Amino acid sequence: MATDQNALETPATQRGQRKVRLGTVISDKMNKTVIVQVGTSKAHRLYRKTVQQRTRFKVHDEKNECGVGDLVRITETRPISKEKRWRVLEIVEKAK
């Protein structure tokens, strides 16, 4: 019976991988929130030319450590507010 209990618990405790992105802080004017811009490249559907895309995320910064120009790694998380679904994982490089 103990083996059946362990078999039932393992799938429930596992969770999917969370998305992780690398981006630049473009605004730090809010309290515990920064805006991070993430750039990606995609091929155009018809012309196959590489097109740059930019996405802005509102990111939770618990200790207000990030400044404008910092390179940060962000991760997906539970909803923290109406628009915040990401949090700062680490500051990769501080702005000069």
Image: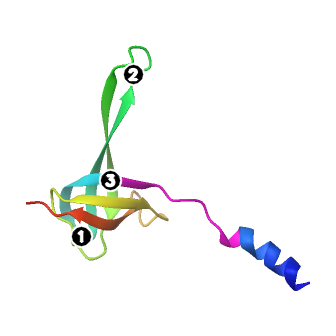
Could you tell whether 9 is left or right of 34 in the image?
right
Amino acid found under the numbered disc labelled 1: Asn
In the image, what residue occupies the spot 73% across and 72% down? 10
Spatial CA distance of label 1 from label 3 is: 21 Å
- Residue sitting at the far top: 47
- Location of the C terminus by quadrant is bottom left
Q: Is residue 5 above or below residue 78?
A: below
Q: Bounds of the magenta span?
A: 12-22
Q: Give the residue number, with chain letter if any, for mark 1.
A: 31
Query: Which badge, 1 or 3, comes first in the chain's sequence?
Result: 3
- Residue sitting at the far front: 3
Name the disc covering residue 22, or none: 3
Could you tell whether 80 is left or right of 66 in the image?
right
Residue 57: percent from left, percent from top: 34, 52
Q: How many marks?
A: 3
Query: Which badge, 3 or 2, comes first in the chain's sequence?
Result: 3
Could you tell whether 7 is left or right of 17 in the image?
right
Q: In terms of secondary structure, where does tag 1 sit? A: loop
Q: Give the residue number, with chain letter if any, for mark 2.
A: 44
- Residue sitting at the far left: 96
Amino acid found under the numbered disc labelled 2: His
Amino acid found under the numbered disc labelled 3: Leu
Judge depth for marks 2 and 1 and give the one in front.
Answer: 2
Whether residue 85 can be seen here:
no
- Identify which residue, 40 or 26, lies in the foreground: 40
Asked whether residue 83 is drawn in magenta, I would say no
Judge depth for marks 1 and 3 and give the one in front.
Answer: 3
Q: Is residue 14 above or below residue 76?
A: below
